[in-house]
């Protein structure tokens, strides 16, 4: 393995990503990846939406002896990358995956619940732990929307409950509910990768037989004792009738992925079925909860 790499970075519009990555590969890039150029976050994309940022930073690694001048000239000559300034740096070779994993630490939510990365033990002897392998799907517990849902689950009586996790992502909420005493959980997501991540994490936590996973169209129509949906306000508003059809008398509901300024609209969409209240806020994100009346 080489001791170092030449790293090139440039910013491009979303529509130029494919062309930029193809050009970098043709120039000899061994690997490339994308991230937000403005630290925007991606949560659960809406159905049919492109889950990418408006302005994207493309990073590529070249052999250390690659010519910066040749790369710069080629990028400036191509219309898809001509507008972005390219920067270079030398990065030392190391085990990137191991470095990233070392930064992950067990996190506590509420009084009992801990989310522990693979290979790390729960710090509390009497804690309830969920072992998580962060994958492509959203949901590691670090984002406020997920953190508020986890704390809510920790404070909610779940023993023997049948739970629906709508927009399950990595499966973190569904698996946490099972660890906290739920009898079974239905995990629903529009992303097949999310369902795979949920399945793998359920196997890792020895609860796969209690967790059923499906796309929205295949979700059984029945009443759940607890419904948690950590998606975005737009989909939540559109899904209000469908989600409430899956609720029965006494069903407890928690909705997240909602910015504070959007909460009134979400509350209004659910008002025909359940009265929601803002019960938690972290940064600009809020958690709305309620209980379906008898």
Image (cartoon, rainbow, N blue to C red):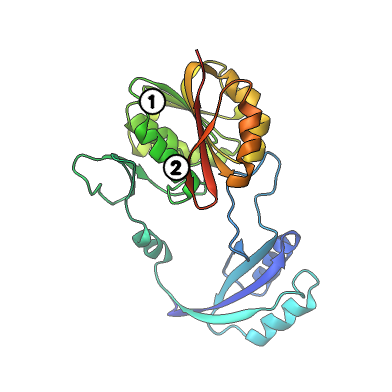
- Distance of label 2 from label 1 (alpha carbons): 26 Å
Earlier in the chain: of badge 2 and badge 1, it is: 2
Residue 148, disc: 2
Query: Which of the 4 image quarters holds residue 18?
Result: bottom right
Give the SS element for disc 1.
helix
Q: How busy is the neighbourhood of tag 2: few (under 14 within 10 Å), some, or many (20 plus)?
A: many
Residue 209's disc is 1
Please state the horizontal and vertical placement of residue 125, each as a whole percent of the image.
Answer: 18, 43
In the image, farthest residue toward the left:
125
Looking at this view, name the residue that lies furthest to the right. Answer: 79
Q: 254 or 142: which is nearer to us? A: 254
> From the viewer's perspective, is residue 229 above or below residue 13?
above
- Label 2 sits on a secondary structure element that is helix
Which residue lies at the image location 39% right of the left edge and 30% below the top edge? 208
Q: State left or right for residue 121 relative to residue 256.
A: left
Q: Is residue 172 visible?
A: no
User: In the picture provided, is 109 more to the left or to the right than 294?
Assistant: left
In the rendered view, would you say 20 is above or below 169? below
Identify the residue at horizontal 62%, vertical 80% (top origin). Answer: 87
Looking at the rendered image, the quarter that the N terminus falls into is bottom left
- Residue 179 in sight here: yes
The percent coordinates of residue 79 (x first, y second) are 81, 71
């Amino acid at each position: 393995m080489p001791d170092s790499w030449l790293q090139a970075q440039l910013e491009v519009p979303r529509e130029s990503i494919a062309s930029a990555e193809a050009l970098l590969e043709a120039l000899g890039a061994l690997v490339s990846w994308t991230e937000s150029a403005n630290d925007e976050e991606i949560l659960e994309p809406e159905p049919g939406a492109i889950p990418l940022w408006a302005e994207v930073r493309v990073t590529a690694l070249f052999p250390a002896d690659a010519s910066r001048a040749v790369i710069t000239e080629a990028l400036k000559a191509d219309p898809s990358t001509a507008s972005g300034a390219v920067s270079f740096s030398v990065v030392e070779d190391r085990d990137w995956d191991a470095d990233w994993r070392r930064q992950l630490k067990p996190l506590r939510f509420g009084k009992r619940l801990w989310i522990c990365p693979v290979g790390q033990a729960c710090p509390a002897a009497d804690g309830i732990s969920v072992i998580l392998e962060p994958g492509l799907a959203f949901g590691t517990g670090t984002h406020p929307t997920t953190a508020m849902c986890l704390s809510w689950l920790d404070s909610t009586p779940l023993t023997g409950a049948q739970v629906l996790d709508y927009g399950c992502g990595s499966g973190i909420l569904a698996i946490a509910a099972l660890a906290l005493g739920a009898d079974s959980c239905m995990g629903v997501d529009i992303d097949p990768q999310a369902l795979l991540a949920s399945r793998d994490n359920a196997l890792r936590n020895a609860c796969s037989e209690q967790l059923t996973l499906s796309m929205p169209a295949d979700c059984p129509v029945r009443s759940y004792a607890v419904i948690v949906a950590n998606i975005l306000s737009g989909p939540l508003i559109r899904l209000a009738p469908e989600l409430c059809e899956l609720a029965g008398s006494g069903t407890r509901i928690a909705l997240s992925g909602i910015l504070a300024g959007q909460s009134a609209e979400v509350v209004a969409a659910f008002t025909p079925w359940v009265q929601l209240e803002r019960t938690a806020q972290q940064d600009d994100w809020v958690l709305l909860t309620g209980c379906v009346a008898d």
